[in-house]
Amino acid sequence: MIRAISVIRSIRNFKMANRHLSRSIAMQSLYEWDFLGRDNKKIKEIVGQNIKEFGPGLDSEDFISRLVNGVIENLPKIDKIIEKSAPEWPIEQITIVDRNILRLGLYELLFGDRNEVPPKVAINEAIELAKNFSGESSGKFVNGVLGTVYREIGEPQKDE
């Protein structure tokens, strides 16, 4: 029984690590896409190259593509939400890294499958990305923006 629980925990931890790496690759792909002028024709190539470089053998290509394409498809809505939630920071003045971490986090929070990724997981993952890839205060900034949006939508799955 104890061994079965240990195996289940190992599988869960592996899946979580896979998802975290997948989000990192999605964020890096969105960063590159944004930096290069947001050419939607190049996004598939950018994602493919980043998976090949940062996640060879990763079995989450569909998840990464779903994240990246979801952000791009909902970009106008997501950017409006960022502007509303951080009015003192015009979208173009937010660093490219922070801007794309926010976009990714908001996509998962607002448009993603809540059964697959609960809201608090989406927020925590975005904060971790900010801590790993951006400046010293980025985690707090990302937490503030996503936390504001989370409260405004009624804190879904709060008790789970």
Image: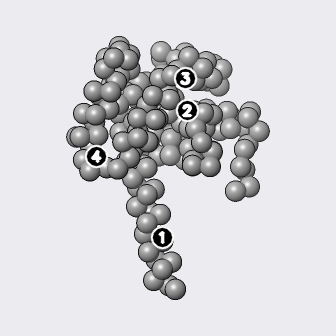
Total tally of numbered discs in the picture: 4
Residue at the image point whose x is 48% and y is 70% from the top: 9
The amino acid type found where label 3 is placed reads: Asn
Q: Do the CB atoms of the residues marked 2 and 4 lie less than 8 Å apart?
A: no
Kindly identify which residue carries mark 1: 9
Kindly identify which residue carries mark 3: 74
Q: Residues within 10 Å of mark 4 (few under 14, many from 20)?
A: some
Determine whether, in the image, residue 80 is placed left or right of residue 96. Answer: right
Task: Give coordinates of residue 104: x percent, y percent.
Answer: 50, 33
* Viewer-proximal residue among 140 and 37: 37
The relative height of residue 2 versus residue 65 in the rendered view (above or below) is: below
Q: Do the CB atoms of the residues marked 2 and 3 lie less than 8 Å apart?
A: yes
The amino acid type found where label 2 is placed reads: Tyr
Residue at the image point whose x is 29% and y is 28% from the top: 46
Kindly identify which residue carries mark 4: 55
Query: In the rendering, which numbered label is found on residue 107?
Result: 2
